[in-house]
Amino acid sequence: MIVLGLTGSIGMGKSTTARMFAEAGVPVHDSDEAVHRLYAGEAAPLVEAVFPGTVVDGVVDRTRLAKRVLGDPAAIRKLEGLIHPLVRRDADAFLETHRRAGAALVVLDIPLLFETGGRSRVDKVVVVTAPPEIQRERVLARPGMTEEKFGAILAKQVPDGEKRRAADFIIDTGSGMEAARSAVREIISELTGDN
């Protein structure tokens, strides 16, 4: 089974590209979705113990949590220390399930693949990219996003150029949906031998 890591900086179209892989029949593990599930389940009491008042009705309130950790590197490290191992365990269970089922290819959608040392967990890496002006437009259109927040997020991410240099495959979402979908099909075909 080939494990393909899917990553890209904020606003590059990674989530849309992950859906394209799923629509093509490739099992996809979405780290962000796993965090949402964990925040509504086993992670909630762990987060509440470290950041009291951030859980409401048994679910981590992301807005409250953000107010507690943003701009505080030590708090962010504490939170990541709680959440990353749980997401990793969730991804490992996903991999084991699909390995047993005989899947030829699976995708691990890992937003911070390079930043968290995730390269060693995958066989190949696809980086989703777009021109900087398209990225900026997409990100600033998000609710509650500001130039300051955007800058802070970018500062924590490996620069797009470095990611592209380290990639096995690159999908440029700035060229439109059909071009991206075609690139996804080509990658699947190359990795699995399916035409």
Image: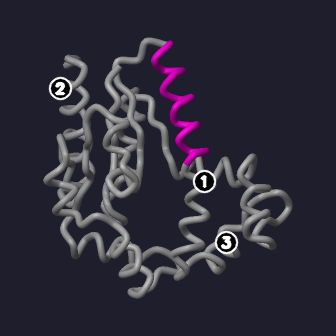
Residue 124 position within the rendered picture, expressed as x and y whole percent measured from the top left: 25, 35
* Number of numbered labels in the structure image: 3
Name the secondary structure under disc 3: helix
Q: Which residues are magenta?
A: 85-100
**Residue 99 on the magenta segment:** yes
Name the secondary structure under disc 2: helix
Q: Report the side of 80 relative to 49 (left or right).
A: left
Image height of 167 relative to 175, above or below: above
Quadrant containing the N terminus in the rendered view: top left
- Label 2 and label 1: CA atoms lie apart by 34 Å
Q: Nearer the viewer, residue 194 or 154?
A: 154
Quadrant containing the C terminus in the rendered view: top left
Pick out the residue farthest to the right: 57
- Label 1 and label 3: CA atoms lie apart by 13 Å
- Label 3 and label 2: CA atoms lie apart by 42 Å
* Numbered badge on residue 190: 2
Which residue is pictured at 50% across the width and 47% down the height?
A: 31
Residue 52 position within the rendered picture, expressed as x and y whole percent measured from the top left: 79, 71
Mark before the other along the chain sequence, 2 or 1: 1
* Numbered badge on residue 65: 3
* Numbered badge on residue 83: 1
Which residue is pictured at 39% across the width and 86% down the height?
A: 147
Pick out the residue farthest to the left: 165
Image height of 24 relative to 141, above or below: above
Mark before the other along the chain sequence, 1 or 3: 3
Q: Report the side of 67 relative to 95 (left or right).
A: right
Mark 1 neighbour class, 10 Å CA radius: few under 14, some 14 to 19, many 20 or more: some
In this rendering, the label closer to the viewer, 1 or 3: 1
What amino acid does circle 3 point to?
Answer: Leu
What amino acid does circle 2 point to?
Answer: Glu
